[in-house]
Every structure is written in C-alpha cells, then in structure tokens.
Amino acid sequence: MAKAYWVATYRSISNPDALAAYAKLAGPSITAAGGRFLARGTPSKTYEAGLNQRTVLIEFDSVAQATAAHDSAGYKAALDALGDGAERDIRIMEGL
C-alpha cells in the first residue's frame, strides 16, 4: 500500500491567534490519526513560480488514513477554531 501525503499551503494568514488555536487542536488530532509531520514552515528557497508561503507536509500510511484524519471530529474542532483566520490549499496525494 502506498503512503499518502497531506500538503497544506497557506495563501494568507489574517488571524494569527485563530491559527494558534487551530494548531493546538490540529496537531494532536492529526498525530492521533496516524499522521507524521515531516516539514512545516516557510520554504528555505523557492524556484520558478514558487511562492514563499507557509507549507505543511504530513505523511500517512494510506490515502484512506489521511482522509479519515481530515474528516475526523477532532480535526473539525480545529477547523472551527481557525474559522476564516487563514486561506489555505490542502491536498492529499498518494505516494509513489
């Protein structure tokens, strides 16, 4: 079974306090669902049309596990805490 990767990029953060409240809930919810944080923060270097925006990379054992983490009650609570405090793009991708 191929691993899966949850990739989140932050286009903008309008409410850092809401983001902090989100992170306090999201991190434990994601790790409890089997997620392993591989990278998070702003890029060390960008190339071509790359944007210097916060990015988070999380590894899961499968797409089903990553999807279940996103759809869980614990992660929903984190999303509720975030509200409209950030504009993000989240993708779940199957590994090779």
Image (cartoon, grey):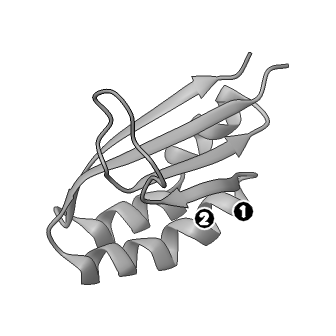
Inspect the image, locate mark 2, and give the three-letter code of the amino acid beneath it: Ser
Question: Which quadrant of the figure contains the C terminus?
Answer: top right
Whether residue 93 sits left or right of residue 78 in the image: it is right
Disc 1, SS: helix
Q: Which image quadrant is residue 64 in?
A: top right
Q: Which mark is residue 68?
A: none
Determine the residue located farthest toward the right in the rendered image: 1
The vertical placement of 27 against 96, above or below, is: below
The vertical placement of 66 against 79, above or below, is: above
Residue density around tag 2, few if under 14, some if 14–19, many if 20 or more, within 10 Å: many
Q: Pointer 2 and pointer 1: residues touching (CB < 8 Å)?
A: yes
Please report the residue visible at 79 percent of the width from the left and 21 percent of the height from the top.
Answer: 2
Determine the residue located farthest toward the top in the rendered image: 96
Which residue is nearer to you in this view: 72 or 3?
A: 3
Q: Position of residue 55 (x, y in %)?
A: 44, 51
Residue density around tag 1, few if under 14, some if 14–19, many if 20 or more, within 10 Å: few
Q: Which mark is residue 32?
A: 1
Please report the residue visible at 79 percent of the width from the left and 36 percent of the height from the top.
Answer: 61
Disc 2, SS: helix
Q: Position of residue 65 (x, y in %)?
A: 69, 37
Whether residue 73 sits left or right of residue 22 in the image: it is right
Please report the residue visible at 28 percent of the width from the left and 29 percent of the height from the top.
Answer: 49
Question: Which quadrant of the figure contains the N terminus?
Answer: top right
Q: Position of residue 78 (x, y in %)?
A: 41, 67
Which residue is nearer to you in this view: 92 or 38?
A: 38
Q: Which mark is residue 29?
A: 2
Q: Position of residue 3 (x, y in %)?
A: 76, 29
Determine the residue located farthest toward the bottom in the rendered image: 17
Inspect the image, locate mark 1, and give the three-letter code of the amino acid beneath it: Ala
Please report the residue visible at 29 percent of the width from the left and 42 percent of the height from the top.
Answer: 51
Q: CA distance from mark 2 to mark 1?
A: 5 Å
